[in-house]
Amino acid sequence: MPDGIYDIDGTTVAAATDLGNVYSYLNGLTEDIILSAPTLLGHDLVLTPHTYLLGAAVTLTDTLYLDAFGIDILTINPANITDVSNDYYGDVSGGCMYSDTSANASLEVEMAPEITNGVVDQTVCIGSSASFSMTAIGTGLTYQWRKGTLNLINGGNISGANSTMLTINQANTSDISSQYNVVVSGVCSPARTSIDAALLGRVSSSDIADNVLKILVYPNPVTTSLNFIINDFVEENNCELKIFNLVGKEVIHTTITKQSTTLVTSNLRSGFYFYKVIENDQVIQTGKLILEN
């Protein structure tokens, strides 16, 4: 606009009034920061909410940010999967007619592990392949299969010890257990442990025909329980199970009424024992047991 004298219109009067109000407001504030020496303000400096008294020459250079309201924080607690979005932004407005909108920001939510399909019991023929599988959701998942509290490692007849599927090929009597489980960990806590699942064994029909083994006994050594599986069990047959200690004293005597029988052995002392299975007054199998309580 060229130099000259112009008529004062309503906008000019309103602006002058606003400046006067601002001056009166600022003059009434009690300063808490005094800039008493010549000061250079700029270079992306952010002035946070304080009352500044400029007591000496001030030079403004480059970029100076006035953070009039401090830092505004949006908190989502707890965050869950439904909060995931690429469209978070902030609107800033004040007493003036102008407002501003921030750029969009993203929120990604990392999930703690959750087991969606657990481990189930498996029954296989001794010498064949057995597999346990499960599914889980979460962020950065890792898997550790266990037998009880013992971590399984890949090697021998074990594979997939750190995956969603554990494979035991070929399964033998030492693999028989009711305590297979998997621990699922992730970048978020807590880790999850599946319920225990059992691997049960049965003898193949060819082994039975060859009279190699009629009764599967596991585990051996024994801790708290002992399982007996009669592969050619006939319900009408009269089967008895007897267990003796080293001096020949009978400590367990029970009738077998089904193909699979589990005995509690936690009440017996650690040591060596012998078992005898009798069918129709005939001894069909005997063996030695080691009890480790």
Image: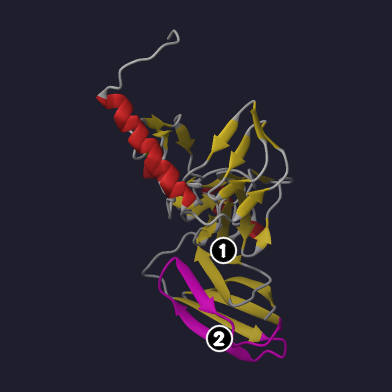
Label 1, secondary structure: give it. Answer: strand
Tell me the residue at 49%/48% (across/down): 111
Residue 245 in the figure: left or right of residue 73: right
Left or right relative to 87: residue 194: right
> Where does the image place residue 203, in percent across and percent down from the top left?
55, 54
- On screen, residue 252 versus residue 235, left or right, reads right
Number of numbered labels in the structure image: 2
Residue 20 point in image, percent of width and height: 39, 40
Rendering coords of residue 45 (x, y %)? 64, 36
Badge 2 crowding class, 10 Å Cα cut-off, few under 14, some 14 to 19, many 20 or more, is some
Residue type for callout 2: Ile
Picture layout, residue 220 above or below residue 207: below
For the N terminus, the quadrant is top left
Which residue is label 1 attached to? 179
The answer to whether residue 223 is magenta is no
* Mark 1 / mark 2, whichever is N-terminal: 1
Q: Is residue 241 above or below residue 99?
A: below
**Of the two numbered discs 1 and 2 in the rendering, the one whose residue sits closer to the viewer:** 1
Q: How far apart are marks 1 and 2 (CA)?
A: 25 Å
- Residue extent of the magenta highlight: 245-271
Depth check, front residue: 115 or 128: 115
Marker disc for residue 252:
2
**Vertically, is 159 above or below 293?**
above
Q: Is residue 11 visible from the viewing direction of this image?
A: yes
Under circle 2, the secondary element is: strand
Residue at figure coordinates x 36%, y 70% from the top left: 236
